[in-house]
Image (cartoon, rainbow, N blue to C red):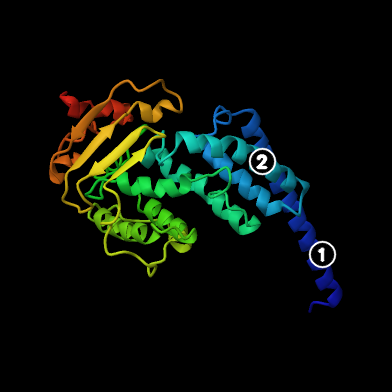
Amino acid sequence: MKTPISTAVRRTLERQKAKAVCKIGLGALSNWINGFENDSFEYDHPQGNYFAGYYAAKCMAALAVQGDSPLGDRWWNDWYNRQHLQRVAPYYTVNLDGGGWTEGFTQYGVLASRNQALPALAVKTAKGIDLIHAPQPYLFPLDQARYLMAFTWPTRNMMDDRGELYNTGDTAIWPGTPRLETYRFFAGFLAMWGDPMAPMMHKYARNMKIALDALHAGDSTEWVDFLFWDNTAPETSDYASLPVSHLAPGVGGVAARSDWSMGVRRVDDDHPSGECGNRHYGPPLDRHVDVEQDVADRDPRNGCAHGYAPLDDRFRSRTIARAGRLGHQC
């Protein structure tokens, strides 16, 4: 039988243990943040998948411990006033205008795009600060949703992608195959911000599920579905009101189509080197216009019509692999 004294002692010990665990966790997190800021090749440049993880982690760590630890104020002041306002927001406004990713969207861009978007929601919830429509705007999370719709093939089973694209480990799933949770995440993100495009993005995400299920690649991520996907959210019947072209000047890309149905032709005027040029390559080295064949002919599973090399990590850059559609043998 537990006495009041033994219960009080037990609760005191539990509180002390919780504080000790919290202190250990804060120490480990502080070591990680300090290590990244002082000994990481990705910290000096405010764009990339490693930096995106740091950008999200430091923001959420600051919000989580502010008021409980002096580290919270220190982390928040640096993250907001320096990392976001002086580095990320200005850089993304110029170099990621219109959306996109410089390392391969379906490779590194999926997680990195979420990490670049989630802090805007966290700060809005915790602080009431709107990072997106601020005097120093940060429109990338909204632009990324539009980019997703524009640069996904009309068939909905392939992303027009650049940069590092690796072997998926499944011969039935080609590099560049979209990830359903990405579309569901941004559908929910747009809805949370009251963006007028949210109903169209929701419908697009629903249609992506149908297309990817046909490839046995329509699985999603539970936490994304739980937090961002509302199966009953408002959605449009189609996307007919969307522009048939989308310019992403930051990465140097433009996508165009005749309409938003699945059985259309698409015109693709790309600057493949320019899409990486803002990060770690030189200026664009080539420019060409591709008028795609019918949808069935464009599917890389039917051959090399869209320039993908076989599933081989040596051909992880589509800028190299796309030689197949410039007249060379795959």
The amino acid marked with disc number 2 is: Asn
Would you name the residue on which mark 1 appears? 12
Q: Going from the N terminus, do you reach mark 2 or mark 1 first?
A: 1
Residue at point 17%, 48% (across, down): 264
Residue at point 27%, 25% (across, down): 287
Name the mark nearer the viewer: 2 or 1.
2
Q: Is residue 93 above or below residue 279?
A: below
Q: x%, y% of residue 47?
A: 51, 34
The amino acid marked with disc number 1 is: Thr
Horizontal relation, residue 276 to residue 245: left or right: right
Q: x%, y% of residue 171?
A: 25, 41
Which of the numbered marks, if any, corresponds to residue 303? none
Would you name the residue on which mark 2 appears? 81
Number of labels in the image equals: 2
Q: x%, y% of residue 81?
A: 66, 40
The image quadrant of residue 313 is top left
